[in-house]
Amino acid sequence: MDAGLFIGGEEGPAQSGERFDVVAPFDLRQIGTCARGGIDDVESAVRAARLAQPRWAGLAPEARERALLRAADEIERARDTLVPLLVDESGSTVTKAGFEVSYAASLFRTAAGEVRRLYGETFPNDRPTRLSLVIREPLGVVGVISPFNAPLALLAKMSAFPLAAGNSVVAKPSEETPLVAVVLARLLHRASFPAGVFNVVPGFGPESGAALVAHPDVEGVAFTGSTEVGRRIGGVAGEQLKRVQLELGGKNPCIVLEDFDATEAADVCAVGAFVHGGQICMSGSRVIVHRALAAELSSALVAKAASLRPGDPWDPASPYGPLIHTAAVDRVQAHVDEARAAGAEVLTGGTASGRVYAPTVVWEPPRESTLWREETFGPVICVTVVDDLTEAIDVANDSAYGLSASILTHDVRRALTAARQIRCGSVHVGMHPFQSNALAPIGGVGASGVGRSGGRYSVEHFTEPKWISVELGPSSHPF
């Protein structure tokens, strides 16, 4: 398919006339072309968004609610278009693509419910005749920079809640997956969103992305992606005192205690680390296992990984498809090779076929190795052994990241004690770290970002509280 920029309710070419090819990561087929937005296009999109925002914010709550619900319906009706596009453009399996469509629709429905929950408050005053109110107002224009790994679901999440709050949006999708973003814009237009409320400027980060973050009329920025890029975005936004929500990288721990079944633990860890080839910021890439279960878990992980046959994302038997580009494969291989050279044992995997990287289990990589400390963003589980829960928590916290974590145990008291001590944005007991919920506050600490996305947490993040006071009695002056 061919796609243009979507600005002010219309789809058209970039002002430069430039376009770029979009290829399927699995077999490198060209699946379409897209207009290449630049600085001038960002200027046009922000202008359209600024003009549209007051009208959108001024609508009755029911009108914004209905628009968001219509958007959810349009997304579901477009399933037969969106699923194949997600498989081809992002390398998602059919199952993962179907989940994205359903989840994107649920996000818009959840956001619709938040429209009526923009609660204000009152608080006491020293003068009994004075009334103080706090109301919430939208920021204005929110710039959304979305990633390639869940190009529909994350764009929906990052946009729907600011929209519910009365903001308008200018989105810059990943250059790897621009087509699905333009399709979403078409669907929102079909859902009768006012022109200019949701705009899409596909392009490349140093051009359109940088221009969007730096634009003086963009009051808030939502970004999901790498920590390196997030730091740059946060720096630019900070200079202009903009509101930011940054969901960045993760090196997420999964603690496996001795009371958990090894085979079940291997299944949980495999799902948490291998879904979408590990290209998920909440992937459980660091497994921290109690010594009493280590030997059993080692055998179970190897058996589980060896049973998986990744490849063509259209094949129902494929657990995952390709990594997004060759540079991603090279990064994963470099991390594994460095750990192996430093003494780690690669129990299974450690090789690639084209852009498909084998499910890999690495035993006891040095804790200063790149594989253990940095986000690999590939299908690699690295395992370390500890003697008790206290050591497991210390190892989990010995990281610059703090996005998500999990604890596999049947002892709820130990689990909750550990959950309160692990430094991260979310902890999941009896499951892997890759969890999501439209109402949950998703985000991290440290190198994993700032702010939270989801439900009222997103809505409140992209609104500004305003204090209004009214004197109901006689005026009183000190002079």
Image: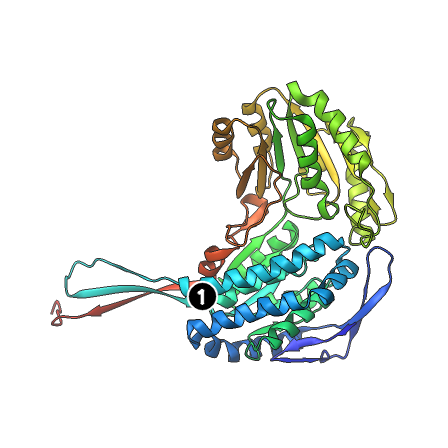
Q: Would residue 237 be found to the left or right of residue 129 on screen?
A: right
Q: Where residue 186 sits: x, y (%)?
A: 66, 74
Three-letter code for the amino acid on which mark 1 is drawn = Val
Above-or-below relation of 82 to 230: below
Residue 252 image position (x, y, % from top left):
62, 39
Q: Image quadrant for the C terminus? A: bottom left
Expressed as whole percent of the image width and height from the top left, the position of residue 106 reads 57, 59
The residue sitting at 66% across, 24% down in the picture is 385
For mark 1, what is the residue?
A: 115
Question: How would you rate the neighbour count of disc 1 (Cα within 10 Å): few for under 14, some for 14-19, many for 20 or more?
Answer: many
- Which residue is rendered at x = 15% and y = 61% of the image? 127
- Tell me which corner region of the image, top left, top right, bottom left or bottom right, holds residue 8: bottom right
Q: How is the image coloured?
A: rainbow
Rendered position, 228 above or below 15: above
166 up-or-down from 93: above or below: below
x and y, in percent, of residue 140 in the image: 48, 71
Q: Is residue 69 visible?
A: yes
Q: Element under label 1?
A: helix
**Count of numbered circles in the view:** 1
Q: Is residue 166 left or right of residue 401?
A: left
At 50% from the left and 27% from the top, the residue drawn is: 414
Most foreground residue, 108 or 427:
108
Q: From the viewer's side, name the closer residue of 452 and 301.
A: 301
Residue 239 visible? The answer is no
Horizontal placement of 177 versus 404: left or right? Answer: right
State which quadrant residue 38 falls in. Answer: bottom right
Task: Choose between 291 and 469: the one closer to the eye.
Answer: 291
| Quarter that holds the N terminus | bottom right
